[in-house]
Each structure stands twice: as structure tokens, then as C-alpha cells.
Amino acid sequence: MRRFLLAAAVLGAGAAAGCAGFLDRLAAGSTATQGSSSSLDERTVAQGLREALRVGAERAVAAASRTDGFLENELIRIAVPDELRTMTQALRKLGLGDRVDELEV
């Protein structure tokens, strides 16, 4: 389950970044050809979007996979729920901080 959540968070962030870059390139290319009669067909746009999603996902996975890339990134890190915060603080006071850290990881 943890891997699924990580993948979902990472893919969402990476896809957005990849699509933004693709759309910028797409807009730049379309302004260069505005005067001509050629335009991008649906298949070309779909292929471009797929490629942008692939590149974005690869970059996001690479960023999250590096050492502490997931745990130190507040955008994708899954924190201990507020309902458990009191319990984790009490466990730390009892000297079980390493167990709490294990739970968070």
C-alpha cells in the first residue's frame, strides 16, 4: 500500500511538471507555424502528452528515490495523522523514538 501511495503522489507531481514543459514547447511550436496551414493533429498531440507524462513520471520517481527524497519532501511525504500525534509524542518521551521513526518511514 505504501508503494502505491508513493507512486500515486510522485506520478501526480511528475506528470504536472512534464505536461507543463510539453505544453510550453507545444505553444512555442504552434506560434512558429501560425502563418502556415499545417497544424498538429490529434494523434501528434496525444503522443506528445504521453511523452510528457512519461518524462515527468521518470523525473519525479528519480527525485523521490534518492536518499531522503520522499521523507524530506513535504509535498509527497505522508505525515503521521493528527489522531496519532499525541501517542507518538508520548512514545518519544518513553524512549521509543526509534519505533516512531520506523513508523514514519
Image: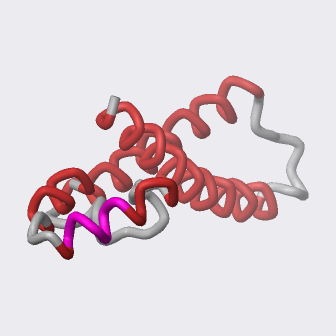
Q: Is residue 101 left or right of residue 54?
A: left
Q: Is residue 80 above or below residue 74?
A: above
What's drawn in magenta, residue-wise?
A: 87-92
Work out whether residue 75 or residue 11 is closer to the camera in this orientation and state it: 75
User: Is 73 in the magenta?
Assistant: no
Residue 60 location (% of width, % of height): 38, 54
Residue at position x 34%, y 28% from top?
1
Vertical arrangement, residue 18 with respect to residue 32, above or below: above
* Residue 55 vs residue 89, the one in the foreground: 89
Q: Residue at x 76, y 26 (%)?
A: 42
Query: What is the total number of numbered labels drawn onto the structure image?
Result: 0
Q: Quadrant of the C terminus?
A: bottom left
Instruction: Please state the horizontal and vertical placement of residue 89, each as a whole percent of the image.
Output: 31, 71
**Front residue of 69 and 56:** 69
Give x and y (percent) for residue 85. 42, 63
For residue 49, what is the image quadrant? Answer: top right
Q: Main secondary structure of the magenta part?
A: helix
* Of residues 22 and 77, the one drawn nearer to the viewer in this rendering: 77
**In the rendered view, does 82 fall on the left or right side of 87?**
right
At x 29% / y 57%, what residue is drawn?
64
Does residue 43 appear to the left or right of 37 in the view shown? left
